[in-house]
Amino acid sequence: MTQDSPGMRDVPTPDLFPTAFPADAFPQVIWEGGERPASLPAQAWTTETTHRDGQQGGLPLTTEVGVQIYDLMGRFTGSSGALRQAEFFVYRPADRAMLEGALERWRGGHPVEPTTWIRATRRDADLVAGLGVRETGMLASASDYHTFHKFTPGGRAQAARTYLDAVQAVLDAGLRPRLHLEDATRAPREFILPFVEAVQALAAPFPASQAPKFRVCDTMGVGLPLEGAAWPRSVPRMIRELRAAGLSAEALEFHPHNDTHLVVANSLAAVLAGCAAINGTLLGKGERTGNAPLEGVLLHLRGLGLTGGADFRVLNDLNDLYETLGQGVPAKYPLFGRDAHRTRAGIHADGLNKFWPMYAPFNVPALLGRPLDLSLTKDSGVAGLIFLVRQHTGTELSKEHAGLRALHDALTAEFDAGRQTAVRRPSSGRRLLNEPSS
């Protein structure tokens, strides 16, 4: 008979919180008391900027590669509605060709709508009038960092006049304007709220299909996911004030950068405050530290029950394509890095051998199409060898197996003699490779 610890009673079966951590789905958000926040939109989704911000951040896109990426976006989202739009530059012939290829596919049933990106000037607005898109993004820099130093003469009023003139041109062309409030997390309330009101008034006589959207841009990654932080850094506060100004959840997008490590947290804070769309890139490509990695955002939106199930396994093909461009994700990049699901610790290997969910956040092979794996190091022990043998051959060996012990002793001797590289088996299972130890 087991004696209970003070204040604790034993139970016959473990509580693995199956509602929060279902066996074959991403982790789910369970609200305390079962009460869903009233500000949460009914649905949320993502929009893509790889052909714009990803390319601007260093992706070397030819027309062919750009169209391949667009095709992979379609395979990724399928009929889920998780990824709904992709924006394109229109200034260079190669970008126009990418857009034309995307529009042709979209007219044929591709699930991701192509849109464009322009500067908020009348001249740029004229560029997109006859391209066949229904919506265009328009760069409307909002902070005094920009409005006072980008225009001659500088200032908020001059910037607003320039932007509104371009909005009028886009509306006259029959398109929906999407105003990108650049540097919003360093912008004054006294510019953003009156400008949003002016754009809405300008668009009021036009059809509902042209009702403007607004993209809140955390351009320098300085936004905070904190409700109590003061304007302009509080992402949820800004979203709530824009909602209070009459914008629907569907009319708002959030576009963050990852300069201070808060890109996914800020995205979720925006959604929780009432923003329906997050703009970023699959695998986080973009300027400086990158855009919101949409796979990370969508994993959590799925857990919130706000979006359909995209096929995350397709992103392995996207990363393979990026590898051919010399732009593959880092080895330890979450979810899709080479080592994202690789352990080097014997205690973790032992846990994987006994009950693999102990050291996996969800069913990685099923949901991501990636194996749980291990590299042999001075710390991986016999348990590491058992894991690798079973993983690659299906054979179950005991810790006392003579051949296993001999191999472990040989590896230990190498590490004791000064070896500093781990031993890992590639997914093909054909040979052992050396890799730098971490």
Image: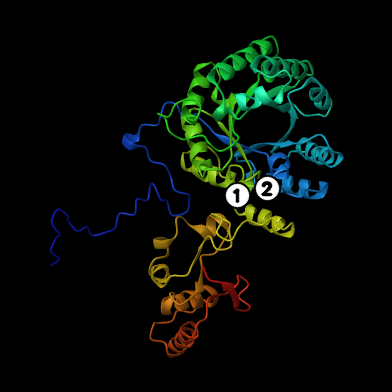
Picture quarter with the N terminus: bottom left
Q: Amino acid at mark 2?
A: Arg
| Rendered location of residue 202, percent (x, y) | 68, 11
Residue drawn at point x = 65 percent, y = 20 percent? 212
Q: Is 341 placed above or below 148 here?
A: below
Residue drawn at point x = 60 percent, y = 49 percent? 311
Numbered label attached to residue 75: 2
Residue 75 visible to an observer of this rendering: yes
Mark 2 residue crowding within 10 angstroms, few (<14) / some (14–19) / many (20+): some
Q: Amino acid at mark 1?
A: Asp
Residue drawn at point x = 43 percent, y = 75 percent? 379
Relative to 313, 415 lies left or right: left
SS under mark 2: helix
Q: Nearer the viewer, residue 409 or 387?
A: 409
Q: Nearer the viewer, residue 64 or 228?
A: 228
Is the Cβ of the residue at disc 1 closer than 8 Å to that at disc 2? Answer: yes
Q: Nearer the viewer, residue 289 or 332?
A: 289
**Quarter location, residue 145:** top right
Q: How many marks?
A: 2
Residue drawn at point x = 39 percent, y = 68 percent? 351
| Rendered location of residue 95, percent (x, y) | 81, 40
The residue tagged 1 is 311
**Quarter location, residue 110:** top right
SS under mark 1: loop
| Rendered location of residue 378, percent (x, y) | 45, 77
Numbered label attached to residue 170: none
Between discs 1 and 2, the one toward the N terminus: 2
Question: How far is mark 1 from mark 2, CA to CA?
Answer: 7 Å
